[in-house]
Amino acid sequence: MPTSSSVIEARRAFGRRLRLLREHAELTTRELARRCEWHESKCSRIENGHTQASIETIRVWARACGAEEQTEALIEAARGIEGMYVEWKEMEKSGLRHAQDSVRQLWERTRAFRAYSQNMIPGLLQTEAYTRAVLEGIRDRRGLHDDVEEALASRVDRQTVLDDKARSFEIVLEEAALYRRVGPPELMAEQLWRLLEVAARPHVRLGIIPRDADRRLMPPVEDFWIFDGRQVEVELVSGFLRVKQSHELKLYTEDFKRLDGLAVHGGPVLQLIAAVLASYNS
């Protein structure tokens, strides 16, 4: 299965963690392998991040190093790495509706949403027509069976979280997302009016990064969502990353702050949207 640099680095970091455990116990890889009844090369592959340690392997490793109290923390970290990368074809193999439903629990339990989008209006803010066009494009591009209407119904139902004033939403868009067409001008105009309506809600903070913003410190990046600061989902071409490692969460949180710092808010947002609307009406 193809993977991402983030997953590879997470495996390497986990391997270093196990190496430190072995070194703290003053064991060589040969002695550790002997105690665990493994080939010595298995220890090297795990420590170098070439092989992901199984749950049982972690238990045996910790026991051999006299560090059984660390077993559960190690297992939790390993499970986080294993579930980091998901291919679209795997997520969508049962259809687009299944892909939409699979994230429902995460959205329902999240109280603070933060999102960044480079090219598209995020799903939470989309009109039905915009969402339908996006889903139809995914269906045709990836050769999926046609359950667009069912997936659309699931997406629309998920949007009800936006009506909950006890939740907070911070969303940053590149200005290019306002111009990126997924359908005829009337579809795009309706979508922009929807943005104006959402931006007026007190629990929603919408920011737009102007096309002429100085990007030396913070260039455009992949679209991502931050859920309560505990989980990040990043959209890639081949799949998506589910990030839970604390150091990576910190990086995404810091980059979101930088992106938000480049964005305009309030009145200037309305002016940018109005300018695009005017271009469709001209």
Image (cartoon, rainbow, N blue to C red):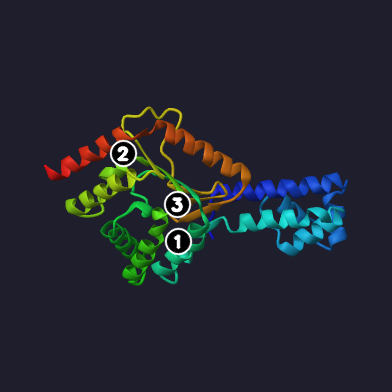
Q: Are marks 1 and 3 in contact (CB under 8 Å)?
A: no
Numbered mark located on residue 88 in the image? 1
Q: Amino acid at mark 1?
A: Trp
C-alpha gap between disc 2 and disc 3 = 20 Å
C-alpha gap between disc 1 and disc 3 = 9 Å
Residue 196 is at least partly visible in this image: yes
**Residue drawn at point x = 25 percent, y = 44 percent:** 179
Residue 66 horizontal side relative to residue 182, left or right: right
Which residue is label 2 attached to? 175
Sequence-wise, the earlier of marks 1 and 3 is: 1
Question: Where's the C terminus, which quadrant?
Answer: top left
Disc 1 versus disc 2: nearer the observer? 2
**Residue drawn at point x = 16 percent, y = 40 percent:** 278
Which residue is label 3 attached to? 236
Residue 97 locus on image (x, y percent): 40, 68
Residue 9 horizontal side relative to residue 134, left or right: right
Foreground: 260 or 144?
Answer: 260
Sequence-wise, the earlier of marks 1 and 2 is: 1
Residue 169 horizontal side relative to residue 64, left or right: left
Question: Where's the N terminus, which quadrant?
Answer: bottom right
Residue 168 locus on image (x, y percent): 45, 47
Q: Residues within 10 Å of mark 3 (few under 14, many from 20)?
A: some
Q: Secondary structure at mark 2?
A: loop
Q: Amino acid at mark 3?
A: Leu
Q: Quadrant of residue 175?
A: top left
Q: How many marks?
A: 3
**Residue drawn at point x = 43 percent, y = 35 percent:** 260
Sequence-wise, the earlier of marks 2 and 3 is: 2
Residue 51 locus on image (x, y percent): 67, 56
Q: Quadrant of residue 207?
A: top left
